[in-house]
Image: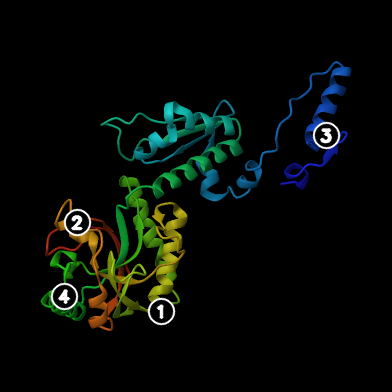
Amino acid sequence: MSREVLAPPLLRMGSNRCYRVNLIHEDFQNSQQGAIAAQQKGETAKPYMEDDLYGDEYNDDLDGQDACDIEETANGQFKLAMHVASSFYGGIIGFKGSTKRRIEGETQCSINIPQKTPTNKTSEAKIIITGRTRNSVATARHKVQLLVASLRKRMKATHFYGVTMTSDEIRENFKKLKTQILEAEIPGISEELFQFDHKLHLTLGICVLLDDTERKKAVEILESCREFLTDLKTPFTVKCSGLEIMNDDPSSVRVLYANVESEELQTFANLCFERFNKTGLGIDDFDRGHVKLHMTIMNNRYLEREIPNTTTKTFDAREILKRWGNYCFGSAQCNEVLLCALGSTTEHRDFYKITGSLKFN
């Protein structure tokens, strides 16, 4: 912002009076002068309009499929049908329609949101954006997408994409560690805090997928990550050794995990993570910008799962880290990435419900 606007010059009028000098914006001044000249000529002056900071610049990137999605109608207007999960309709409409009206006013477009009814609650209904120019429609879509992305970040994750760690070696070593810890009878440590051995995995990223269309799109995104495997050697070898905590206070811990070493998996995971997040379906819940490879061993959330309404939010891991901080779980071969539904099963023999997968070979 201009320095003259933030700190305008001062004009002193005598010893007791001091005024700020409000400079007239150059464009506004020219607009005023133009209006006066037009009046003198008997012409109708055009109203002052701020420059569009988003329109042309944003839509210079409008090409390929994005451009084809916007159709020109018979009456010369432009129309776009875009899918948005019905769970976001309320956020787009806003309190008494305020958010919808604001976007329509900023873009000079009309936005038609379908009714959220029992017969129209899934993926077929679409939001219709209509405007006088292609740019205005594209800008309205961009604003809706930004709003949906903001709303999605506030929602609880529904899916994760990751790698199973259920090789015989890792499962057996996990069960041995669990037995040793429980036999030590450490205060506050119970079996309910542990992950199930048949559910051991590495989470590469999490998603909020709210309908069939979003789940299908997520599977397509996962499949598109195959191109990242071109320069990598598969299957990936993954080694698990050592225990760490998510926070910096070992006496008050929510998550205890095993360290993971796999340089090529790390490279692949970061690329997948970036792609999912760019589509708006993925969430970077810790704002790291990259994947932290880890295998969860104990989580206080598991205690809440097994014992509802529990008031204990953390556990003391000091003794565990002291005795088993360098524990080795072994290694596993990674030959696929799975897209799974969170909390999809509590059975002791089942993995998570698999929505889709990317097999390397």
Crowd class of label 4 (few under 14; some 14 to 19; many from 20; radius 10 Å): some
- Amino acid type at circle 1 is Glu
Q: What residue sits right under mark 2 in the picture? A: 304
Crowd class of label 3 (few under 14; some 14 to 19; many from 20; radius 10 Å): few
Marks 3 and 2 close (CB-CB < 8 Å): no
Residue 16, numbered label: 3
* Precedes in sequence: disc 4 or disc 2: 4
Q: Which residue lies furthest to the front in this view?
A: 15
Q: Position of residue 268 (x, y in %)?
A: 41, 71
Q: Tell me the CA gap for discs 4 and 3.
A: 80 Å
**Can see residue 229?**
no
Q: Is residue 66 left or right of residue 20?
A: left
Crowd class of label 2 (few under 14; some 14 to 19; many from 20; radius 10 Å): some
* Precedes in sequence: disc 4 or disc 3: 3
Q: Where is residue 226 in the image (x, y as percent from the top left)?
A: 40, 67
- Residue 144 versus residue 65: which sits nearer the camera? 144
**Can see residue 35?**
yes
Crowd class of label 1 (few under 14; some 14 to 19; many from 20; radius 10 Å): few
Q: Tell me the CA gap for discs 1 and 2.
A: 34 Å
Q: How many numbered marks have been drawn onto this rendered protein structure?
A: 4
Secondary structure of residue under mark 3: loop
Q: In the rendered view, tell whether residue 48 sits above or below residue 58.
A: above
Q: Tell me the CA gap for discs 4 and 1.
A: 28 Å
- Residue 310 versus residue 251: which sits nearer the camera? 251
Q: In this view, does 266 lie to the left or right of 102?
A: left
Secondary structure of residue under mark 4: helix
Q: What residue sits right under mark 4 in the picture? A: 178
Which of the two marks, 3 or 2, is nearer to us in this view? 3
Q: Tell me the CA gap for discs 4 and 2.
A: 19 Å
Q: In the rendered view, tell whether residue 127 sits above or below residue 68.
A: above
Which of the two marks, 4 or 1, is nearer to us in this view? 4
